[in-house]
Image: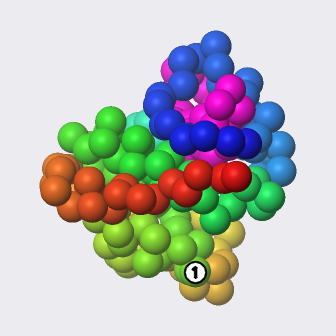
Amino acid sequence: MTGEAGARELRSDEFGLAEKLWENYHQTKGDPSIDRVFGVFSGNALVSVARCRRHPDGYEVDGVFTPEDLRGHGYAKLAVAALVEACHHDLLYMHAILGLVPFYRAFGFESIDESGLPPTIRARFAFALGEMEGSNVQPMKRGPGLKLAEFRELLKNSVQRRN
């Protein structure tokens, strides 16, 4: 891939592109009736995705994925930034992999106790039986709002050109 990457929300007829990328990530599927999916394109190729799913009691960020051979170029950062910018009016929740908690903190997410998750979002990890850390995840939330100056600094130089 050459050139600069750009992020945008996918149209519902483009969800298949995300699902192709997600084949190697829990076989995730998108549902246009409840999902907003954001993608990063390098040229014509989709290189990273992030999803915001509407639940009856809240919005969940998940499906953040960049294939291993495309990592290290800031693509996931662009995907999450596009999602946060578009969904910044809503309270967002997620189950962050423990090693990625600092990454999500940069976008304004903060660690919370499992009991702070809305019931339908918490139910996705019911198998953990109250032991999220043992499942290698940390519940997080991000309050509404967008601090543009911080956001611009975060994205500054986040994508490197590949030669």
Q: Is residue 128 visible?
A: yes
Give the magenta range: 29-50
33 vs 84, left or right, is right
Q: Is residue 36 visible?
A: no
Amino acid, disc 1: Gly
Foreground residue among 132 and 73: 73
When the figure is inspected, residue 7 is found, relative to residue 100, above or below; the finding is above
Task: Judge by depth and name the residue closer to the eye, 162 or 88.
Answer: 162
Q: Which residue is mark 1?
A: 99
Q: Is residue 44 magenta?
A: yes
Predominant SS along the magenta part: strand
Scheme of image coloration: rainbow
| Local secondary structure at mark 1 | helix
Using a 10 Å C-alpha cutoff, classify the residue at mark 1 as few (fewer than 14 neighbours), some (14 to 19) or many (20 or more).
few
Q: Where, quadrant-wise, is the N terminus in this rendering? A: top right
Residue furthest to the top in view is: 13
Q: Is residue 42 above or below residue 143?
A: above
Residue 83 position within the rendered picture, expressed as x and y whole percent measured from the top left: 41, 42
Q: Nearer the viewer, residue 123 or 64?
A: 64
Q: Position of residue 69 (x, y in %)?
A: 80, 58
Residue 60: horizontal and vertical position, in percent?
45, 49
